[in-house]
Image (cartoon, helix red, strand yellow):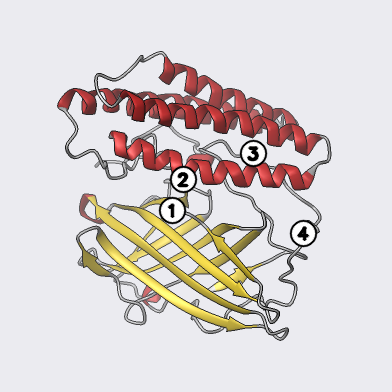
C-alpha cells in the first residue's frame, strides 16, 4: 500500500457522479491539522504483484468511480489473483488523502463469500514526527461473462493519531469499479460506440415487479443520457474548448440527465425512496455548480470542501438508488462488449 499527500493537510477531490469537475489546486490548503511529517510510502504492505507477471494470467483493465485506472489479474480458472488500484479519500477536516493498494495472492487471499469475492488488508505506520496511522482497505468483487469482465466496490479508512492525542479520520466511502479484457471500462475515455454498463447489485429483492420494471426504465435513461453526454464531452476536448467552458458544459449535461429522468414520472411503489434519490441527484448538481463558481472566484478551499460534500452525498445517493432497485444509475460508466462476444 502506498500513500500520496500534498503539503499541508490532504485535499478533497472526488469525481462527481460521472461529471468530472477538473478543479485542480496548485497550492495546498492551510487547514488546522497537518500531515506533513507523514511518510509517502507505507513500507509495511507490498505494492508488487508477482501473479501479474505470469504468462498464464489474464489482465483486466478499467477504472474506478473516482476515474482512477485499475487492473485485475485472473488465473486460468477465472479466479482473482491480484489487483492494483488508487483510492482517494476525504478527511474529517475537509482534506484529501490518497492510497495505492496492490494485494496479490497468496500474500492476500481473495476468498468467496455470500457477497462475492472479498479481500482486505490492514497496515500501521509511524512517521518520524510520531504520527501513527492505521489503514484498513478492502474490496468485494464479482467476475462475470467467463472472465471477460469484473465489477465490485472498494473502500479504505485511515485513522491518524497525533502525539498530543488528536485524531483525524479519512474515508474513501464505497467506490464502484469495473474492468474488462479490452480495458475500455472507463467512461471518461469513451472513444467508440456506447456500450453496456456493469450493473451493481440491487438491494430491492422484495420489491414488486412493477417497481423493478420502473427501475429498469430509469436505469436505461441513465445509461443512454450518460453515453450522449460522454460523446459531447469528447467533442469538446477534441475542439480544445477552454477548461472552464468544458466544466460548465459538464454540469449542464448532468442537468440534462436529471431532467430526462424526472420526466419519467413517479414509480408505482416506494415513491418516497425514489424521490429522495432524485432529490439527492438534484442537490449534487447544485453543489457542482457552486464548487465551480467558488473555484472561478479563487475560493479554492471552499470549492474543495463543496466537492467533498458532493462526494459523501453520492455515496448516500447510490445507497438510496440500490435500495429502490437501480443497478446502472449507481454504476460507474460504460463497459463495452468485447468484439465477437
> Which residue is found at the position 42% from the left and 58% from the top?
154
Query: Which one is nearer the viewer's eye here, 142 or 280?
Result: 280
Secondary element under disc 1, as helix, strand or loop, is: loop
Residue tagged by mark 2?
Answer: 315
Secondary element under disc 4, as helix, strand or loop, is: loop
Any part of residue 333 in sight: no
In the displayed structure, 133 sits above or below 170; it is below
Query: Which one is nearer the viewer's eye here, 82 or 323?
Result: 323
> Which residue is found at the position 38% from the left and 42% from the top?
319
Residue tagged by mark 1?
Answer: 174
Compute the Cα span from label 1 to label 4: 25 Å
Any part of residue 285 in sight: yes
- Residue 201: x and y, percent? 28, 45
Q: Nearer the viewer, mark 3 or mark 1?
A: 1
Query: Which one is nearer the viewer's eye here, 341 or 64?
Result: 64
Compute the Cα span from label 2 to label 4: 25 Å
Residue tagged by mark 3?
Answer: 21
Earlier sequence position, callout 3 versus callout 1: 3
Amino acid at each position: 500500500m502506498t500513500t500520496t499527500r500534498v503539503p499541508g493537510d490532504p485535499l478533497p477531490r472526488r469525481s462527481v457522479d460521472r461529471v468530472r469537475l477538473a478543479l485542480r489546486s496548485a497550492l495546498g490548503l492551510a487547514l488546522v491539522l497537518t500531515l506533513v511529517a507523514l511518510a509517502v510510502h507505507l513500507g509495511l504492505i507490498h505494492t508488487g504483484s508477482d501473479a501479474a507477471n505470469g504468462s498464464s494470467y489474464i489482465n483486466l483493465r478499467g477504472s474506478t468511480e473516482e476515474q482512477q485506472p485499475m487492473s485485475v489479474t485472473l488465473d486460468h480458472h477465472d479466479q482473482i489473483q491480484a489487483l492494483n488500484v488508487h483510492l482517494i479519500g476525504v478527511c474529517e477536516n475537509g482534506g484529501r488523502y490518497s492510497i495505492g493498494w496492490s494485494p496479490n495472492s497468496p500474500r492476500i487471499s481473495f476468498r468467496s463469500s455470500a457477497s462475492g469475492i472479498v479481500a482486505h488488508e490492514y497496515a500501521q505506520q509511524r512517521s518520524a514526527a510520531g504520527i501513527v496511522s492505521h489503514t484498513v482497505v478492502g474490496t468485494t468483487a464479482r467476475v462475470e461473462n467467463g472472465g471477460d469482465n469484473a465489477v465490485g466496490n472498494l473502500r479504505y479508512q485511515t485513522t491518524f493519531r497525533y502525539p498530543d492525542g488528536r485524531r483525524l479520520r479519512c474515508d474513501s466511502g464505497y467506490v464502484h469499479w469495473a474492468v474488462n479484457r479490452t480495458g475500455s471500462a472507463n467512461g471518461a475515455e469513451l472513444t467508440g460506440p456506447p456500450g453496456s454498463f456493469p450493473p451493481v447489485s440491487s438491494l430491492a429483492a422484495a420489491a414488486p415487479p412493477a417497481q423493478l420494471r420502473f427501475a429498469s426504465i430509469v436505469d436505461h435513461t441513465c445509461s443512454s443520457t450518460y453515453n450522449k453526454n460522454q460523446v459531447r464531452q469528447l467533442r469538446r476536448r477534441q475542439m480544445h474548448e477552454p477548461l472552464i467552458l468544458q466544466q460548465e458544459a459538464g454540469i449542464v449535461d448532468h442537468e440534462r440527465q436529471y431532467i430526462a429522468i424526472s420526466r419519467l414520472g413517479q414509480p408505482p411503489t416506494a415513491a418516497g425512496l425514489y424521490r429522495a434519490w432524485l432529490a439527492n441527484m438534484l442537490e449534487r448538481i447544485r453543489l457542482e455548480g457552486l464548487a465551480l463558481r467558488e473555484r472561478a472566484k479563487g475560493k479554492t478551499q471552499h470549492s474543495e470542501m463543496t466537492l467533498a460534500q458532493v462526494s459523501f452525498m453520492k455515496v448516500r445517493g447510490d445507497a438510496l438508488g440500490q435500495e429502490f432497485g437501480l443497478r446502472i444509475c449507481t454504476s460507474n460508466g460504460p463497459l463495452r462488449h468485447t468484439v465477437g462476444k
